[in-house]
Image: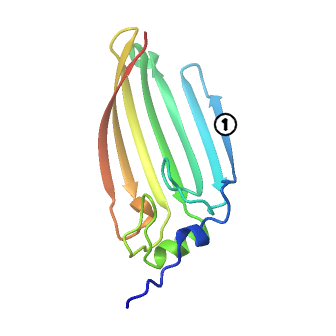
Amino acid sequence: MQTNTLPDIRRVCISEKVKYGVGLDVEQALGHHTGGFLRVFWADGRSETLAFGEVDNSLAGGLSIQGAAWGRAQDVWGISLASNGLSKNRRSYLQMGALSFFIGDGRLNYQRETIFETYYSWALNGHVALALDYQHIRNPAYNADRGPYQVIGARIHVEY
């Protein structure tokens, strides 16, 4: 009979049904058509992630510039950089070969995940905007053996 030597995530990473954390979001106008942001986040890393992405700490910053400078006042260009990490408990669990809800393949070579993102949003009219987005993800899912990956996306925003 084979026994599983991996601990149950509910005993290792989850000791409580409450997730504790703190975040700070600072947004600041840097000029008439430019704004910046800085976000810092920390969570206790003792709760299983069942929604959004698995992250226990994060630092992100970026800029957005309205298109007035090039004659497209309703357009926006944005750029950001984020660095995400896992708690020691979650890292240890995944390095033992375990799987979590979103990540893990039994061979975690932990490194912080870094995401560079830029987008451009074109205002098609007063109610519709189309945005193209590019992301460069280094150490996706916190694994230095993966990536980097490049993701190209499109969004449409409709207001009525």
**Residue 133 higher or lower than 86, as above or below:** above
Which quadrant holds residue 79?
top left
Q: Position of residue 6 (x, y in %)?
A: 48, 80
156 displayed left or right of 23: left
Residue 77, quarter of the rendered image = top left
For the rendered model, the colour scheme is rainbow
35, 99: nearer the viewer: 99
98 relative to 137, above or below: below
Residue at 60% across, 59% down: 47
Q: Which residue is mark 1?
A: 26
- Where is residue 1 shown, x and y percent of the image? 37, 91
Q: Image check: 1 left or right of 49?
A: left
Number of on-image labels: 1
- Tell me: 96 left or right of 61: left
Quarter placement of the C terminus: top left
Rendered residue at 32%/55% (across/down): 149
Quadrant of the image occupied by residue 86: bottom right
Q: Position of residue 103 (x, y in %)?
A: 42, 62
Q: Residue furthest bottom?
A: 1
- Three-letter code for the amino acid on which mark 1 is drawn: Val
Callout 1 environment at 10 Å: few (<14), some (14 to 19), or many (20+)? few
Q: Is residue 29 above or below residue 8?
A: above
Residue toward you, 91 or 146 = 91
Name the residue: 40% across, 59% down.
Answer: 138
At numbered mark 1, what does the secondary structure look like: helix, strand or loop? strand
Between 113 and 67, the one nearer to me in the picture: 113
Where residue 96 appears, as percent x and y from the top left, is: 47, 79
